[in-house]
Amino acid sequence: MMKIGFDAKRIVRNRTGLGNYGRTLVSDLSALMPADELLLYAPDKGNDDLRQGMETLANVQMVYPEGKPLRLQRDLWRMRGIVSDLRRDGINIFHGLSGELPRGIRKSGIRSIVTIHDLIFMRHPEYYNWLDTKIYTYKFRQTCLEADHIIAISECTKRDIMELGGVEEDRISVIYQSCAPRFDGNSPESRQQEVSSHYCLPQRFVLNVGSIEERKNMLLAVKALLRLPEEVGLVIVGRKTPYTKRIETFVNQHGLQQRVRLLHGVADDDLAVLYALAEAFVYPSRYEGFGIPIIEAVNSGLPVVACTGSCLEEAGGPDCLYVSPDDDEALAAALMQSLKGAEGREQRIMHSCQYVQRFAGNNVAKQVMEVYRQVNPSPFS
């Protein structure tokens, strides 16, 4: 039997992005490795519904710092103190799921793997405050020194790790993300009516999912909405940031209050239904490490319109539509080609669904398990 530890901070706190990545991977590994123990190390219990989804898995156990430490103490535990707990628990491999590893893990003898999702804070520091870029850069460089192996979620991220971190290519494996099985476009009519009523959704709408921040560039989609039929709305799901105010101001100035819905804190089960209700998906981000919402959208049967400039073509494949992140007219035209009834829409959806099968959950888990086998083969023998 093998014991694998995971950094579970994002698993219990983040509803999208890094949280979805961790929960999906651990769930798939749990089914793939039923005789092994998967221990999730979190600084606190986080959100009940996110945590409880993990606790239902038979071979998964949550681990927290002892006592009731203050926030600073919890942060220090995750950065360094966790190593003694990993040794106490007999962990064979520790997997940092969100780009970080604790200091001292290499010296402890515990083999370690880290998944790095993106290096946007180095590639585009203008989207972060100065202090955060310094902290994130320090953690990245320290993690590269600690890690036995690095998983990059795309070829784009792999190139960034090699260029900006000076990491040798043979220490990096590209393993694409998968999305949870609930994103399949199938939900009962009663659930669709319930979710539509609860969130006061337009009858026809284009969907976006992700933090509402400047890098995600959602103002471009709001501008494009002015060129779409009036009965088509835009539903934006994600965490609020100061950038949200810019979107709200534009909406108010152009009389789009009835066509734009900004939703926050949407439950996981409701999110899958939102995809099923949507007519198309838009992802105008300027830079991403991968773009898991694109995979969720395609698996849900939606045509996708995204932007050029990073790795979104790598995520969506050749049959999604891509435009410049500064061209709202081109975005509107691509969205018109993606609405129901548009010529070629169904064929593009079908081909995109075939493309994203390479990201299917169990395949990702099997690839990750093979990395575990490479860095610490003895528990598998």
Image (spheres, rainbow, N blue to C red):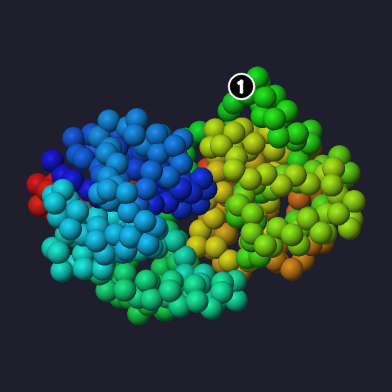
| Nearer the observer, 376 or 247 | 247
- At x 89%, y 58%, the residue is 253
* Residue 128 % position (x, y): 56, 72
Q: Which residue is mark 1?
A: 188
- At x 67%, y 62%, the residue is 242
Q: Is residue 43 visible?
A: yes
Q: Is residue 130 above or below residue 358?
A: below
Judged from the image, the secondary structure of the residue bearing numbered disc 1 is loop
Q: Is residue 226 visible?
A: no
Residue 108, quarter of picture: bottom left
Q: Is residue 115 left or right of residue 265?
A: left
- At x 24%, y 61%, the residue is 81
Which quadrant is the N terminus positioned in? top left
| Nearer the observer, 278 or 146 | 146
Residue 250, quarter of picture: bottom right
* Residue 246 % position (x, y): 76, 62
| Nearer the observer, 141 or 78 | 78
Q: Is residue 145 above or below residue 215?
A: below
Q: Is residue 315 left or right of residue 302?
A: left
* Residue 276 % position (x, y): 64, 33
Instruction: Say what amino acid the circle numbered 1 marks.
Output: Pro
Residue 38, quarter of picture: top left
* Residue 2 % position (x, y): 16, 44
